[in-house]
Image (spheres, rainbow, N blue to C red):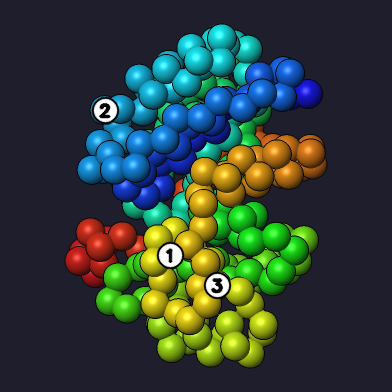
Amino acid sequence: MKSFLAVDTAAEYLTVIARDKAGKIYTSYLPDCAMRHSVVLLDTVEQTLKKAGMGLADCDFFACVSGAGSFTGIRIGIATVKGFCTALSRPALPVTSFEAAAYTTGRVRTLALFPAGHDCFYAAGFDEDKAPLLPPSHLSREEAAALAAAEGYLIAGHGALPFAGAVSADMQAGLLAAVEAKSRVRDNFVPPEALRAVYVRRSQAEENRR
């Protein structure tokens, strides 16, 4: 069984997960980093690996959430994992926030949603086996509700969502499930230089420069 370290810095929380070669899972979760991921990430990685009795060199691969989410947070997670992979010649496994949410819902079609401001959402759709149906998109609340009704999607995402029947996803459990599922397929791994952030639309700073 492959050992790994996975990090999620794409929202206000921070998740770090380590799995040892025996398959035992060790998790550290900070519910509110107040967007201080750059300050607390490396210490949290060190603490998690210490609990697992592991070092970075014991990891067969490194995974990170590549978005959508906080522009700054995503960059911090990707840069950190790139550094680990490059230093240790390990492959990287990108996982989207959408996949992490979708892997919490079981075998149902899932529309993963994350707030994008102005009553809009970042969205991606998945079938019962978590294969993509809708690529990452930017939808209004009305568009998301109509799409879910038309396509039979269960809506899931981080925190409370303003849709009837929406599921508040356990993003820790979803990250672990997504990493375990995706790591079974060799083609899902990428070299560290190929890690890319999933930005559904431009950052506010980029929009302001237009």
User: Mark 3 — residue?
Assistant: 155
State whether residue 20 appears in this view.
yes
Q: Regarding mark 2 in the picture, which secondary structure is present there?
A: helix
Q: Position of residue 9 (x, y in %)?
A: 40, 41
Q: Is residue 63 left or right of residue 181?
A: left
Q: Residues within 10 Å of mark 1 (few under 14, many from 20)?
A: many
- Residue farthest front in this picture: 165
Identify which residue is drawn at 63% across, 12% down: 58
Q: Position of residue 1 (x, y in %)?
A: 78, 23
- Give, as a three-letter code, the residue at label 3: Ile
**Does label 1 or label 3 sit earlier along the sequence?**
1
Quarter of the view holding residue 23? top right
- Give, as a three-letter code, the residue at label 1: Phe
User: Mark 2 — residue?
Assistant: 39
**Does label 2 or label 1 sit earlier along the sequence?**
2
Q: Nearer the viewer, mark 2 or mark 3?
A: 3
The mark found on residue 114 in the picture is 1
